[in-house]
Image: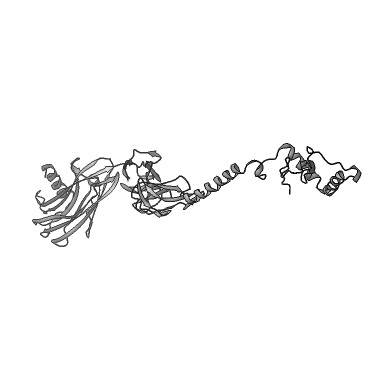
Amino acid sequence: MSLLRNLTWLFVLAIAFFAVVPNVRAQSTSITNFQSPAHTLVGEVTVSFGVTYSMGSGSYLGAVIWDRDANTFATGTGTSSPDSCLSKTGTQYANAASCPIGVPKSPIGTESFTFTLRLNSPKTYDLEALAVIEDSSYTGITSSLSSQDFTILVRDKVDLTVSVQSSVVVTVDGVQKSPGIAFEAVYPGSHTVSVPSFVQVDNSTRLRFDHWEDGSTSTTRTLYMQDDTTLTANYVTQYRLSLVSSQANASGSGWYDSGTVPTFSVPSRSQVVWVFQGWYEGSNLLTKSNSGSIRMDAPLALVARWEPDYILLGGIIGVVVGLAVGVAYFGGKGLPFLTKPSGKRARRKRGKRTQTVSEPAAEAATVSEVKTTPKEIVKPSTDEKVAMFCTQCGAKIARDSKFCKECGTKIS
């Protein structure tokens, strides 16, 4: 304890605060239950403590906050309980954080002191709490003196800390910070903090915002700050499930939270001839069922494998081959329904279709054409064989012909 401080205390207590009382020696003091903030904003701050004492009758008890940098009383006021601080009409100690209470009601007990300090400059204040018992002889002898050193960091700004994962970018009052934990010294008042809903880590991994540590689920929030504040954003890791299917559309692909179990599926058959064979991850068969589920602990890419239905495909090929063989074997006039008639025959057929109504008359004319009187009958020569007409197209045919050369009709 410096000599100057002791002399100041003796001077203040002897001259400024105490009246003349009988000479009684003090015994002891002890500071207890000390409370003071480690840091605060510019302005007023409260410091409190108790003083346990043991003293003779007629001695005086007092307490003070001492500014060790300025080597004088700290600026402020003091109160005590249950007694009140003695008032001093002089201006020298009007703003001093001092509180002499005079002669206690009991020679042994505890007195509580509260000081309101006015710390108006942003800096670290080096302070000391003092408790003293002074005898009444004004001889300048301090019977008991106890103290406790402490500091208070006074600032004009407060610290805002936003705790996030290393790849998350935080925005404070519209300004983006570097990825990771954001630290910002801001003036007291309203401030806006926001984080992204999703953060892409790579093509198959991302982060999804879930909630703030205090329970809020909004990615953007406005705070009214009067003290240091820490916000923690909680994100959930998501993995991508990719499904590849060459013959049919698969369902179930997308982003899923880590640890969840999504389902996926494809049709069991596609385009008639393709049959599903199984889901594979690389070369590993996961399931032969066309639907399944899987736990997402990492990104996954599943491939649906397909094979033709060889039985069905063989039947179709057999039918096609049979038709081709039939055409090749029975082609030409042998399969009139599969061949295209010649131009002349087609014209005769069209003519026949247009004359279908008058067909009986044509037959009658044919009969009358070969009808002759007995006297006119002439026996044909051996080279003259034309004596018949085709009933289908009307062409002349030899009597011994089995097919009409024009239309291919069988002659009965």
Determine the residue located farthest toward the bottom in the rendered image: 106
Q: Nearer the viewer, residue 87 or 347?
A: 347
- Residue 251 in view (yes/no): no
Q: Nearer the viewer, residue 83 or 355?
A: 355
Q: Quadrant of residue 328?
A: top right
Residue 324 in the image: state x and y as whole percent: 57, 43
- Residue 365 in view (yes/no): yes
Residue 124 in the image: state x and y as whole percent: 23, 41
The answer to whether 25 is drawn above or below residue 345 in the figure is below
From the viewer's perspective, is 381 left or right of 210?
A: right
Quarter of the figure with the N terminus = top left
From the viewer's perspective, is 403 left or right of 128?
A: right
Q: Nearer the viewer, residue 291 or 273?
A: 273
Residue 191 in the image: state x and y as whole percent: 38, 44
Total residue callouts: 0
Q: Nearer the viewer, residue 264 or 218?
A: 264
At a point 29% along the width and 47% down the height, the residue shown is: 44
At a point 36% along the width and 50% down the height, the residue shown is: 285
At a point 44% along the width and 48% down the height, the residue shown is: 306
Residue 304 in the image: state x and y as whole percent: 42, 48
Which color scheme does this rendered protein use? one colour
From the viewer's perspective, is 95 left or right of 341?
A: left
Q: Quadrant of residue 6?
A: top left
